[in-house]
Amino acid sequence: MDTTTALLKCDVCGDSSFPSRNKLFRHLKDCAVNLAFHTVNTVLVETLTDVTNVYYYVTGGRLRGRTLGSVERYSLHRKCWEAAPSMQENRGSHGAVGVGNQLFILGGGGFRSNLATCERLDVTNDKWTAIAPMTTYRHALAVVHVPELKSIYCIGGWVNGSKCSPVLEKYDVDNNSWTTCTPMDVPRRLLGATAFESKLYVFGGNADDHEDKDKKWYTDAVESYNASTNAWTRLAPLPTPGPCSAVTVGAFIFVFLHGKSVLRYDPAADTFTTLAPLPLAEWFCFDAKALGHTVYVNGGITKGVWSKAFYLYDTLANTWTELPSMQTARRRCAAALVHAA
């Protein structure tokens, strides 16, 4: 007697691998949304075919009580790690962005205190240069480059180990100068932030010193900043509060909830879709940067242990691929993609 259970098929995407109605129904809830995303982003996002001079830089961080100044970079062409010149100052919980062939490092925590200092590496000659400092000393901030505005924004953070910051500062790349902008509604640290259509989007984080009567440890607050009006707008909250990283891919934003899973945020609909879990259990304090339809994720801690982890997340396939491990274990390091040519 044949006891094989017939598999059920999804009429939306054609997947015929579901052994039960319950599994099919769970799939159907997000299937149409996922199919629409795939269709839109396949058209919008081009795959970078020539990565000869593209490097993923990883800077500083913390390692078992030490604050690091070392830098390593991953060659996307040769698929290996190599040493790069150390920063002028050791720092962790800082921000990093790539602008052309330059790597910008902003703020963070030094040996004994928060930093306002910033520095820039010209990767064509491997020379570090100090640039104008921020007006506020803070670490655990978010840093976002907005190419259309030729600006780098530094958002939120942790001040003097006691207070979450709502501060937003804008760095003018061409003029090496800072402007203080309207602060966020919700002071926070360890937040995720990215740019979409010249606006800033910030997600979650820790906000344990706000005025809530229960002094909640995590926040689910999501806000958007419009530079043309210098104003913030509150958006739909995260499904799960907590620290996170965020990147923009095509018409969507991907939010990596530390210790949990990947979310896809649709700015047009102001909605979230839950995707794959993170590839490592209890993975916190990592960084993430997007290239094409993929996202590189590195470092952090897993189950309380400092990590050399380096993974690639495919936003179209919703899958993870493990890449060669970093040379040094680092938590709260900062990463950036830089074009060396």
Image (cartoon, rainbow, N blue to C red):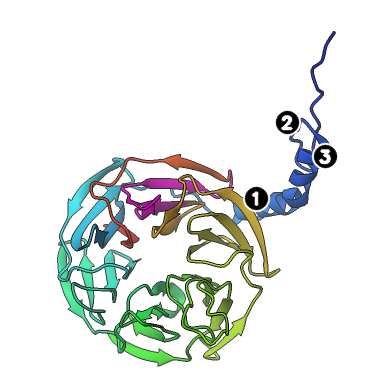
Residue under the point 79% across and 17% down: 4
x%, y% of residue 209? 46, 82
State left or right for residue 8 relative to residue 86: right
Disc nearest the viewer among 1 and 3: 3
Q: Quick one: SS at disc 2? A: loop
Residue under the point 33% across and 62% down: 332
Q: What stretch of residues is rendered in magenta? A: 295-317
Q: Quick one: SS at disc 3? A: loop
Tell me if residue 30 is in the magenta stretch.
no
Q: From the image, tell me which residue sits under label 1.
A: 38
The N terminus is located in which quarter? top right
Outermost residue, top direction? 1
Q: Can residue 49 be seen in this view?
A: no
Label 3 to label 2, Cα distance in Å? 12 Å
Q: From the image, tell me which residue sits under label 3.
A: 11
Q: Quick one: SS at disc 1? A: helix
Q: From the image, tell me which residue sits under label 2.
A: 17
Residue closer to the observer: 28 or 216: 216
Disc 2 marks which amino acid?
Ser
Tell me if residue 312 is in the magenta stretch.
yes
Q: Do the residues labelled 3 and 2 touch (CB within 8 Å)?
A: no
Outermost residue, front direction? 214
Residue 279 sits above or below residue 111 on the image:
above
State left or right for residue 335 relative to residue 43: left
Q: Dot 1, crowdedness within 10 Å: few (<14), some or many (≥20)?
A: some
Residue 143 sits above or below residue 183 on the image:
above
